[in-house]
Amino acid sequence: MLDVRELSVDYGAAPALSSVSMSIAAGELVCVLGPNGAGKTTLVNTLAGLRHARAGSIAMDGRDITHLPPHRFCAAGIAVVPECRRLFTGLTVRENLEIGSYLPDARRHRAASLEHVCTLFPVLRERLQSPAGVLSGGQQQMVAIARALMARPRLLLLDEPSLGLSPMLVEVLFGAIREIHAGGTAVLVIEQNVTMALDVSSRAYLLDEGRIVAQGTPAAIAADPELRRTYLGMAAPSAST
Amino acid sequence: MTFPSATLLAQSALSGIFIGGLYGLLGLGLGLTWGLLHVINLAHFGFAFLAAYLCYQLASVHGVDPLATLVLLVPVFFVAGVAVQLLLERFRISPLNSLLASFGLTAIIEAGIQAVWTADFRKLESSYAGYKLQIGALYVPFPEVLTLFLATLLSFSIWAVMRYTDAGRAMRALAQDPEMAAAYGINRAAHAVLLSGVCGALAAVAGVCLALGFTLTPSQIYAWVGVVFAAVMLGGLGSALGPLAAGLIIGISEALTMAFASPSWAPIVSFTLLIVLLVLRPARA
Amino acid sequence: MKPDRVYAALAAAGAALATVPFLGLPAFYESFLYLVFHWIVLATSWNILSGYSGYFSFGHGAFFGAGVYTTAVLAGKYDVPFAYTLAPAAIIPALLGIGVGAVVFRVRGVRGELFALLTLAVTFVLATIVLNTPVDGGPGVYLSAVPVPRLAPTPSGSFYVMALALAFVTVVIARAIERSRLGLGLFAIHDDEDAAEVMGVPTYRYKLLALGLSAGLAGIAGGIQALFVSYVTANSTFNITVPLTVVLMSVLGGSRHWAGPAIGAIAITVLLYFSTAADQAVAGKAVVGAILVVAVLIMPRGLLGHWQRRRVAANGHARPAAAEVTRDDAFVQARDGNTRNCVLSLRAVEKSFSGVRALAGIDLDVSEGEILGVLGPNGSGKSTLINVVTGHYRADRGNIAFEGHDITCWPAHRIARAGIARTYQIPRPFPHLPVRDNVALTAIFGNAAQRTAAARACAQQWLDFTRLGARAEAMPGELNLHQTKFLELARALAARPRLVFLDEVLSGLTPGEIDEAVDLIRRIRDSGTTVVFVEHVMRAVMAVSDRIVVLDQGRVIAQGNAAEVMARDDVAAAYLGGAHARRA
């Protein structure tokens, strides 16, 4: 469904992504791991249309969307939950969700989608009229994910959903992510929490300094010495401790 | 300084309400572009005055009913607003630079007005000016009632659109975080151009109200700048109802000042209020 | 051109122009040139505040008008000899300006367009007061009976001489300010007032000074103008023309340059002359407006600004290397000899934001002369740690001691003066100051407190130390990421700190650049500064740190030798999350 070839993106003058190639099949749950500065957020932002690629291509169902203007990426079936959520804090929760379903296709199913996200995140039902800015971090994260779901995407992009949340909330969140995936939506998750990410995904990519250095099943990645090297800067100790 | 009679005070307060309505009407367009597009458009005043002069011309010289001129002027100035925003879209412009550029545009419009209509005072003599309602001992001239009515109608309409329609929500989201709004399919440029056109149309309506109630002369354009900015800042940038409420407050305080002191002191009220507001509540959009 | 040559050229031009009234030309030329000088004064004086510091004022008309009316009332109504009215015509507007500034500059939110509006409002308030009080009262003030000082064969010649003298003085003042500490501070305020404040620039004082000078000079111009027109009214004095025109002239000519407004003034006055001569005064106003629109949209830096950029781009010449920054042997020896002092210590430091505990009780000691690496996953509190120690935030609880002083509650600029410097994760150089001035700023206003010329030489030294010496004249926008980070370093070092915090200076650099940076970090330490750096690039951390500290969830979970610490299970767990650590 999503086919990324040789994607190169710059951050100012420096390369943030170099020749990244990856793919996501319809309904798949894929995670992208890597230390800070590896380029994970740049990858998500480029897939969402917020960043311009210098070279390479992004295709959705065979259609090249690389050079579309930013506001057309959503119509291609991609919805993003960015790092730090970026809710419209001056609008109410309900209005945020309505913006999520701004496009005509999504708008037609607005009522049904609203019901769906309120079932997924029951706490939202009581908070629909609250300004989004007064909610707690965990609740804001739920609103951000709900907003993306209102767009009825084929591919959901999640950038560090667990950032700043307590372990308990993280469990709740990942439970919701499993449910979303079970409903048929493809998901791309960027996570610092390696264990949780590998637990829910069917495939993983490891990004380091703008390049893909490993990919495969969660078990394969977990055992891959590259993982330890990129995160901890050294080879794994020879004997298990 | 003799204490004015109750009737005089009430009449003053009433005229203050009416002028406040005009402040609110002028402030509506200005505040929307400032709050939602981060463009400070001084040319809003230029457009309003140009519309006023055109209304005067059509009504005085060609005998068109002043209210009927709205049919022509509103679309024309909608297009003018669209054109200005399309031009601005090509340049990434800071709010300060938009203030400067629109300052220049206003000077051009003022020069154009002066070239066509000279600096002589122009007063639109219409039958509307003659209508007066009477409420007890108070006189209520029709043009002013009309202005207040239009100001209220338009302010509430825009408020409703902002609150209850997708387009309005999209505008508010765009003002907050244009990148994320685009990520959900909202076309920033298209919405900006649309809003600018609407504000141009609002300027046209304000212009017709100006023509109905006031004597026109080109240099008067700048007389309104201070007081309308005060109304916008007091009412809140990007707010639909704020400038109207603020305009009414300012209008009444001005009118009462004029009742107690001499009319030429009136500008001090609004400008001092603006200064105080800017110092106590610097509202950054 | 060298500074003294510019002043000499100006003096020569001034002397040459001063002979004009004695050449017996028709009065028209003297009056026309009077007008040119008059606008040069108004535009240049406006620029001293608004162009240099970025506080665009629409109120120059108020100060001009105050000067006009001071002279008009004193000379026209009270028969004070004209020459004696000029000092009050300078002082009263200056006081007005300082009075407004004293209130307004205290308010952080009033900048940019808000300041412009406020000053416009001040103009109209002043106009109303003048119109409604005995100052004018309505009919205007006549000065036709006031004798004109005999400085030249004819009255128009005398006005010419007065205006020439004032223009000369104003331009010289503008030039002098541009080269001075005041000018540097104003330019820094223009680019980033908060950063300038943190660096020690006395922003409030400088802005007041600039406003006072600007207003005073405009006032004198007003005083002379009052006599020139010999009949003043509130409407003609306080209308929109003066504020609009001075903005236009400065923007057109280049508001960052001392000569920009003068060039703009000459251009516009000539242009307006041709349109009025052709009996098109109204068209003249339209042309002025059109030029403003075009200038703001297409040439925001004005004529001189563009010319300057092309000149700098062409002259990429290399500077001779200044003396190497000396290695502080005593410092290095003390470190090697293990007689280490503790230079910074934190005890139980806590900091929360809206209920989120960024720092949950930090205990840390930094020894003099060490290179300490601070690591930890995202959200572990590394950036907050730097921000709290450098005074950007105040700790909720706990103590921070630096070289024996308790700095827990000190404000940022005081901590900077005490000898702690930092770089920013996202570099924030002043975009419109050349590289060398960016560095010199810290030297002038920070810990070292040097004089301008010495500071610039010192800045060159630090630029050479960070291998940026050849780019000293470039603008920060022309540097790549690697060079910008090194510029940040040079700025931090120019304050001669005892302790420097480096916040992710290596992210985004290529392996070769990282090696250079690592070498630089060592040299920094060797020159006498303790280094604490926050980093993710593991390779660099392993290569250069003496010791590392790992944070997780706002606490220190491990410290010690780099290789040993990173092999620990709990550290692996912090990075990779729980169960994973046991799989390896």
Image (cartoon, rainbow, N blue to C red):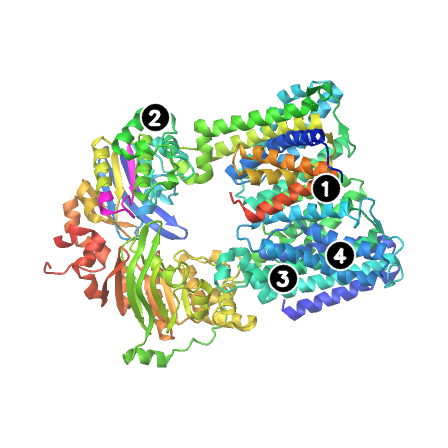
Look at the image and tell me whether residue C561 can be seen.
yes
Q: Amino acid at mark 1?
A: Trp
| Front-lying residue, C50 or B115 | C50
A160 falls in the magenta region:
yes
Which residue is identified by label 3?
Answer: C209
Please state which of the two labelled residues, at mark 1 or mark 3, is closer to the viewer: 1
| Badge 4 vs badge 2, beta-carbon distance below 8 Å | no
Q: Position of residue B205 (x, y in %)?
A: 62, 26
Question: From the viewer's perspective, is C299 left or right of B131?
Answer: left
Asked if badges 1 and 3 are on one and the same chain, I answer: no
The span shown in magenta is: A154-170
Dot in front, 1 or 2: 1
Density class for disc 2 (Cα within 10 Å; few <14, some 14-19, many ≥20) is: many
Where A25 falls versus A227 (above or below)?
A: above
Mark 3 and mark 4, same subunit?
yes
In whole angstroms, how far apart are the C-alphas of marks 1 and 2?
56 Å
Tag nearer the camera, 3 or 4: 3
User: Does residue B53 appear in this view?
Assistant: no
Numbered disc 1: secondary structure: helix
Q: Quadrant of residue A229?
A: bottom left
- Looking at the image, is A104 positioned above or below residue A162? above
